[in-house]
Image (spheres, rainbow, N blue to C red):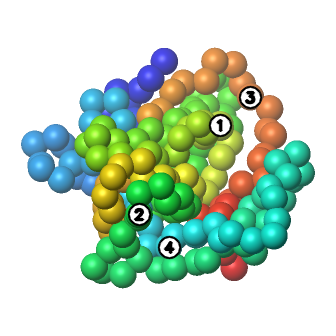
Amino acid sequence: MILSNIEIQRAIDEHRLTITPDPQPRSPEYPDCPYDTTAVNLHLANTLSIPQPGPYTFDLRRSGIAGFLARNSKQITILEEGYALKPGQFTLGNSVERITLPLLPNEKSLAARIEGKSSLARCGLLIHFTAPTVHAGFDGTLTLEMINLGVVDISLFPGMAIGQLILESVMGDPEANQSQFQGQTTPAGTAQK
């Protein structure tokens, strides 16, 4: 079951979900309210990780993809004037928000999905395609796999609303099974020290 904006706020208040920084304001009467009826906005952090061409291939059967991407990508800081994502260009970003979905008893755990925003998709910007699931038990920032499928540059700015988080109730009590991306704080999926 997908949570409404009121239920997302209740889950935050009950510590079934932590979003840091806390999404404010909570009321839709304010024009900058980050809540839609069934989602809360995610914002783009100021770092991008751009995979670089090289004499390697991705062996997706192996673990350690986060470290591999970190070693074979160029890290850039998005300046105040923005970053122009070229048509056909792929990059990794991450959310400003750190998301924590604790494992809780009595069917109180939540899972989530990252989805793009339709206004950005209409310009050709895909956000977090093919892997939108945020599992119960996850803690970290969210990596955004972004590609410009449009015909002109798309400007990316630090702090811009880039996607939305949809929360869902988990039936049953899940058993912990941490991913290699647990605790990630960088676009490639590593934890910054």
Q: Which residue carries the number 2 mark? A: 86
Foreground label between 3 and 4: 4
Q: Is residue 175 above or below residue 117?
A: above
Foreground label between 1 and 4: 4
Q: Give the residue at x 50% y 73%.
A: 47
**Mark 1 or mark 4: which comes first in sequence?**
4
- Given residues 164 and 169, the one toward you in this image is 164
The reply to whether the C-beta atoms of the residues labelled 3 and 1 are less than 8 Å apart is yes
Q: How many angstroms separate mark 1 from mark 4 (CA)?
A: 26 Å
Foreground label between 1 and 2: 2
Q: How many angstroms separate mark 3 from mark 4 (CA)?
A: 33 Å
Q: Residues within 10 Å of mark 3 (few under 14, many from 20)?
A: some
> Where in the figure is residue 15, as x and y percent of width and height?
51, 44
- Given residues 34 and 174, the one toward you in this image is 34
Q: Which residue carries the number 1 mark? A: 136
**Mark 2 or mark 4: which comes first in sequence?**
4
Q: Which residue carries the number 4 mark? A: 47
Q: Amino acid at mark 1?
A: Ala
Q: How many angstroms separate mark 3 from mark 1 (CA)?
A: 8 Å
